[in-house]
Image: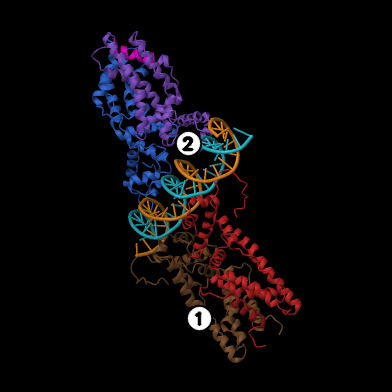
Chain colours: A brown, B red, C purple, D blue, E cyan, F orange
Amino acid sequence: MNAELPARRAGRRRDPAADSAIIDAVLDLVTAGATLTGLSLVAIAKQAGVSRNSVYRRWKTKDELYLDVLETINRPRPAPTGADTRGDLAVLLRALAERVVDERASSMLRALNAEAATFPRLHRRYFEEIVAPRREAMNRVLRRGVERGEIRPDVDPDLVSELLVAPLLARMASGGTDRLDPERTSRQIIDLVLSGAAPS
Amino acid sequence: MNAELPARRAGRRRDPAADSAIIDAVLDLVTAGATLTGLSLVAIAKQAGVSRNSVYRRWKTKDELYLDVLETINRPRPAPTGADTRGDLAVLLRALAERVVDERASSMLRALNAEAATFPRLHRRYFEEIVAPRREAMNRVLRRGVERGEIRPDVDPDLVSELLVAPLLARMASGGTDRLDPERTSRQIIDLVLSGAAPS
Amino acid sequence: MNAELPARRAGRRRDPAADSAIIDAVLDLVTAGATLTGLSLVAIAKQAGVSRNSVYRRWKTKDELYLDVLETINRPRPAPTGADTRGDLAVLLRALAERVVDERASSMLRALNAEAATFPRLHRRYFEEIVAPRREAMNRVLRRGVERGEIRPDVDPDLVSELLVAPLLARMASGGTDRLDPERTSRQIIDLVLSGAAPS
Amino acid sequence: MNAELPARRAGRRRDPAADSAIIDAVLDLVTAGATLTGLSLVAIAKQAGVSRNSVYRRWKTKDELYLDVLETINRPRPAPTGADTRGDLAVLLRALAERVVDERASSMLRALNAEAATFPRLHRRYFEEIVAPRREAMNRVLRRGVERGEIRPDVDPDLVSELLVAPLLARMASGGTDRLDPERTSRQIIDLVLSGAAPS
DNA sequence: ATCTAATCGAGACGGTACGTCACGTCTTTGG
DNA sequence: CCAAAGACGTGACGTACCGTCTCGATTAGAT
């Protein structure tokens, strides 16, 4: 977590509760409306109920701290079964919807998106470790769908992918206050994208 | 702009160039990555090349200033012809896409979305004056489409609307750096949403 | 007063009431506790009930304004009769005592004394035009007293002069709140300085 | 100095050098011509070579700071021996004269006198703790002088006291630039006040 | 009677200083 | 060695005031 191992030297041990208290503090504050640049280590320390020193000792910069916060909200990647396209898409979309529903995680990601320019390293890491693999997984499912004849071959798979994912991302971005049901919503989206809105 | 009518009072006139210089400064800074809370009237004054005084004289708070900035990036609402559903949707979506392409406007709106909690009045106004009327216009088009038999009556029009709009909103939220062609992109989205990704 | 003669050109005349209102304002403010550096032309204008412009038009700097204020509180120099030393000293001291009693004048002079370093030109002028002539007058009276055998020839006339004047100056300096009777006080001082406190 | 006892709390100690640097700065600036109202804690900090923070941390207002400055220039009260009246007066007057000669102390007191109205608490404290006891001591000496037959019983002791003290106070008030010799000057004043200027 | 020029109050302008506040660092006491 | 408290210098913020400049309205001599 904190990268450097203590190496078991003498003296008082670091309070492990402080680590999570600090990370929780970040998520609480961001969820309450704070921006990543606006947050200061001082404010975080106050919210976490520890001294400034205890924060600075663990992380030199906000950047490094946010990296560890990002790790925290990461979740195991969903594994599509490969049985049928619709089902696989449902697995992927439902995982995304659940992340959107998690207010702390989506607040953090929304903040990060808005300030990508200020935290390029953070944003890149978020993209590479979280976004890219999931996007690739969805593309694999769609490609397989085309092979199986369940997806029209004449449409851009990237566009289909974007159409499936965008409604949930837009909700995350706007911080939509109304709860959504992950299972139901993702199913509705898939149905509509596959069948189309026009009468067949 | 500042609401009060001239009334020809005594004293030196306010420099009208300063008004737009300040508003431009806000857009420039937000586009460069600043957050709405992070921006200070001082920084804005410096960027605009006017004295702090001249900013504080016009707007007491950032909130009021941002309101006028929002007015600036407002645009005439597109008017669907009513001829056919596909064409009307294209008119509406293209207008949205053009806003997404306008880097200054979309940066401002992205920032506002991310900090809606901090600027509730601003966010409400943005929603009521910009989002709501356009959303309603799209709903009207879709309802008419159902009447005409161009849209399936068994799907939730709100969901269709969301699917059409979300890809563009998601781009705006993520600050996608790659240029998109408003005309082409909106047409592709409409095609896919209407026809569906599955073979007919 | 304002030095430059108008030369009878066309245009609106300056309001003569403003001149005295401004000078009065200075005296009022200084009497109320303001320092000469602390006073601003803006505050003076407000107190006088005129616009800033009207002050700046008449005097470019506080220095010049204060010069005219000093003129205002100047008074006709007392004229000793030359009849007898005690009577002549009484005339001079009573004039000084009356100035001390004049709260506005003494406040102004106290302020000037305290900030002599900041207003050297003003202070010099005050000394040359007000202090020096009166001091010289008193020295003349004392010299004549020595010639007449009414003052001991073995004491420094400057010291005698200082002893006579100092009690009143000290009162002026400390802004003594208790009223003093010019006639009575100056007589008491002269009596004591001439006769001495020790039994003869 | 700052009243509160140490109590050995945690945290970094205040730099004691800063305390005296700040107080010295006040005296230096006032001696250079600054007024008490004109002085700002910012200017003091700059002169003292410490941060504004360090000044504001110690004293909330100029008033409180000046109180401590006054303490600094306080001196042990002179103790008359009680042997003879002339000698006792000389002890008291010489102490006053020495204070007058001390440029920093007299500048501070002159400034305080001039702005008594603005700093009433400060002025009252100065009067009660410094002026009153010394005045009382001189009155005691004079009363004893009357009992011993060294002072005429028919003159007001307060007036005698005022005559002795006023020349020195007047010098302090006017910021007389010419050095005076405490020993010699106080002796001359006492001689003249006791013997009188008129031939016996 | 009209023209002209200066004054007047109102108020915008750039600049400067102020007191406050938050930040990240450093230092001390105590566990 | 860590935790907490707190002093330290730096720097930005919003406010207030200053002296100047600009404007419409007013005023009074000159034409």
* Chain ID at mark 1: A
The majority secondary structure of the magenta stretch comes to: helix
Residue annotated with mark 1: A133
Q: In this view, does C98 lie to the left or right of B145?
A: left
Q: Nearer the viewer, residue C6 or D75?
A: C6
Relative image position of residue C167 (x, y in whole percent):
36, 21
- Examine the rendered structure and indicate whether residue C53 appears above or below residue B129: above
- The nearer-to-camera label among 1 and 2 is 2
Farthest residue in the right direction?
B147
Identify residue type, mark 1.
Pro
**Quarter of the figure with the C terminus of chain D:** top left
Direction from residue D53 to residue A154 in the image, left or right: right
Is A70 within the magenta?
Answer: no
Q: Can residue D139 be seen in this view?
A: no
Residue farthest to the bottom, as pictured: A148
Within the image, what quadrant is residue B155 found in?
A: bottom right
- Can you tell which quarter of the image residue C38 is in? top left
How far, Cα to Cα, is label 1 from label 2?
75 Å
Side (left or right) of A196 relative to E4:
right
**Marks 1 and 2 belong to one chain:** no
Vertical side of D196 occupied by D16: above or below: below
- In the image, residue C49 lies at what x, y percent? 54, 34
Q: Does the magenta stretch include residue C193?
A: yes
User: Residues in magenta?
Assistant: C186-200
User: Which of E19/C164 is in front?
Assistant: C164
Write down the residue under mark 2. C57
Of all chains, the one bearing label 2 is C
For mark 2, does the 10 Å Cα neighbourhood hold few (<14), some (14 to 19), or many (20 or more) residues?
few
Identify the residue at horizontal 64%, vertical 68% (top origin). Answer: A178
Residue A29 in percent (x, y) is at 52, 63
Residue F6 vertical position relative to residue A71 in the rendered view, above or below: above
